[in-house]
Image (spheres, rainbow, N blue to C red):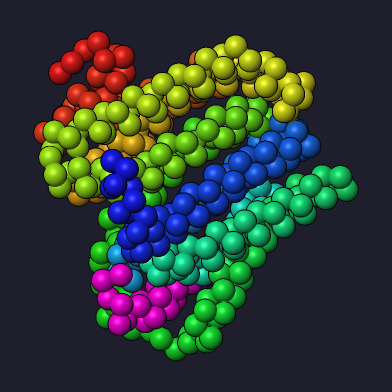
Amino acid sequence: MISKIKNLKNNQGFMKYFKNTSILLIEKMFRLTILALVTIWIAKYLGPEDFGIYSYILSIVSIFLAFTTLGFDSILIKFFVLYKNKKQTILFTSFYLRLLFSSFLITVLLVLFFLVEQENSIFYYIVIASFATIFQSFWVLDFFFQSQILGRYVALANITTVLVSSAIKIIFIFLHKPLIYFIYMYIFDFGLLSFLLAYFYFIVYKKIDFKLLNKRIGVILLNRSWPLILSSISVILYMKMDQIMIQNMLGSYELGIYSAAIKIIEIWYFIPIIVSSSIFPMILNFKKISFEQYCIKLGKIFSLLFYISLIIILITIVLSPYIIDILFGVQFEQSAQVLIFYSWTCIFVFIGTAGNLWYITENLQLLSLFRSIIGLMINIILNLVLIPKYNLYGAAISTLISQIMVTYVLDFFSKKTRQLFFLKTKCLTFNIIRI
């Protein structure tokens, strides 16, 4: 074992990828933690009503962002690696396609605003925040740097952005600025990150050639990505539908209370992301060696994440009133009970994130899309039934049930994922049931 580790250390190619991946994982953990803490501070400052509006706006814009990425996030790195001689053309073609779709989206929103919704302040905020999609076009540079094993530039850009942005938001809080300032900061975050990525690209490659555009490559990219566009939109709708429906069925105040509880749980979501990202190469190697070993290793990852999620749930149940009071204040005290209900989603978010490794290694992207659509439909139906009866608790229960269905139960109904269902069953029953 020691000799293998020494051999890996002496392998320059492995160490280069290891350092690149480590930098990105550390950056992600740091960035998500800072973002969560600053968002909690913003929530405490704005109060339930305005924080509910803020959460609703970001939920709607996140759907726009899923559309304007065009599903490129999952395929660009692969294209950059496979077609090295055309990587610059691929880069700028994907940039122009994103810019085109973002411009189209904003044009539609502006037309709707001037024709129909000028009296609606929330719609005005949505139109303002949607300009972030323009800057997101530059984020193709993120995947370009990753493909060239230059993740340190991505990490530096992200960390600089989150530190500068967080400092300005804290200043706005001390200056008692209204909600619109934090909407502007949302656009600023995208703009600053885009500027930094473009700056680092110029530093490395000395020039930016915006004339590199290839229609044929554009058509190929869109043909490959259209299922991923649908998948991205269905996933984000599935994740945000509870908040959207609470806003429209109960109001901004209630959404603020609900969103505060969600933010506490979302702080922990970096754990399964980092674990899954770090062990993905190992899982692929075991798949090549032995299917049995592949299943055993994946089962151990499920068990690890399951026990971590149980610890988080136990801490949440015992300390939820104190957590809400310390972090958000007495105005959010209703969030404590919602937090207890919502904390149970941790189990299925954690094992669901690890379960996605199976879908990736087995090339089950279309099945994953189908699963997300089913989850969205279940979530909508349950929210329509349970929110009028149980208010915010109904939304939390709906999310929990839909998570159980999507990340666990639906795996049973396909031969391609039934073994995955059995692995999760073994984990969820503390290895008592052995299938």
Kindly tell me whether residue 394 is visible in this rendering. no
Residue at left offset 33%, top offset 31%: 301
**Image coordinates for residue 396, horizontal then vertical, percent:** 50, 23
Residue at left offset 33%, top offset 64%: 13
Quadrant occupied by the N terminus: top left
Would residue 105 be counted in the magenta stretch?
A: no
Residue at left offset 56%, top offset 74%: 200
Task: Please state if 27 lies on the left or on the right of 2 as rendered.
Answer: right
**Image coordinates for residue 357, horizontal then vertical, percent:** 29, 42
Q: Nearer the viewer, residue 131 or 350?
A: 350
Quadrant occupied by the C terminus: top left
Kindly tell me whether residue 122 is visible in this rendering. yes
What secondary structure prevails in the magenta region?
A: helix
Please, is residue 344 above or below residue 283 in the view? above
**Residue sitting at the far right:** 175
**Image coordinates for residue 368, horizontal then vertical, percent:** 27, 43
Task: Please state if 315 lies on the left or on the right of 418 as rendered.
Answer: right
> Which quarter of the figure has residue 428?
top left
Residue at left offset 71%, top offset 31%: 48
Q: Which residues are drawn in magenta?
A: 81-104
Would residue 89 be counted in the magenta stretch?
A: yes
Q: Nearer the viewer, residue 227 or 190?
A: 190
**Image coordinates for residue 130, horizontal then vertical, percent:** 58, 59
Please, is residue 255 above or below residue 168 in the view? above
